[in-house]
Image (spheres, rainbow, N blue to C red):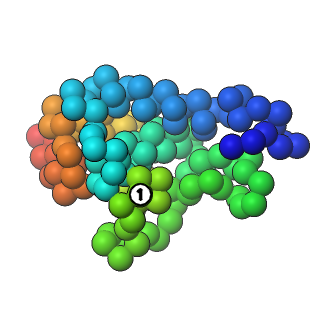
Amino acid sequence: MAANEKCESTALISDIVYHEYTHGVVCHVYEWMLKPYWEETGSMNEGLADYFAATMNDDSCIDDFKYDSDCLRDLKNNLKYPEDYSPEPHAGSGVFSASLWDIREAIGKEVTDMLVITAMKEFQPQTFSEFVTALVTLDQK
């Protein structure tokens, strides 16, 4: 992505920095690193990176410095699974990240962030449904 008049380098945009950093965290937490990087595993990788970038900035809009729209990706969306899902990770991540953002809005940042991180570490879910099951299991403890 090229810089524009709002920002001379996208490397200076916190959304991008947090997003890319989260990919490193995901690779560290998940022993199998959410592979293959396609379909649900790739979408979860991208969705987690988007979620943590958004939650760190307390803003559902990822990269509002983009030229042609308000956001590169917005976690506050109405995407539904399976009708809005695409196997391409950047396109498919919106369904997953939006669900995490919805939970965050319902129960708060601190609780949601803790549930998501713990689900990643303890359950290592590989599908959307496994991630939901992990979150529900943790919430019931």
Q: Of residues 115 and 131, which is closer to you in this image?
A: 131
**Total numbered circles:** 1
Give the vertical position of 140 relative to 75 (above or below).
above
Q: Amino acid at mark 1?
A: Glu
Q: Residue at x 83, y 43 (%)?
A: 4
**Residue 140 horizontal/vertical position (percent):** 13, 46
Give the vertical position of 113 relative to 101 (above or below).
above
Q: Of residues 141 and 136, which is closer to you in this image?
A: 136
User: Which image quarter is the N terminus in?
Assistant: top right
Q: Residue at x 59, y 30 (%)?
A: 17
User: Which image quarter is the C terminus in?
Assistant: top left
Q: Of residues 46 and 123, which is closer to you in this image?
A: 46
Identify residue for label 1: 88
Name the residue furthest bottom: 83
Can residue 118 be seen here? no
Can residue 47 be seen here? yes
Relative placement, left or right, of 119 versus 106 is left
**Residue 31 horizontal/vertical position (percent):** 21, 27
**Residue 52 horizontal/vertical position (percent):** 46, 38
Name the residue furthest right: 5
Relative placement, left or right, of 106 versus 71 is left
Give the vertical position of 116 relative to 79 (above or below).
above
Q: Residue at x 36, y 61 (%)?
A: 87
Q: Secondary structure at mark 1?
A: loop
Label 1 crowd (10 A; few <14 / some 14-19 / many >=20)? some
Q: Residue at x 65, y 46 (%)?
A: 63
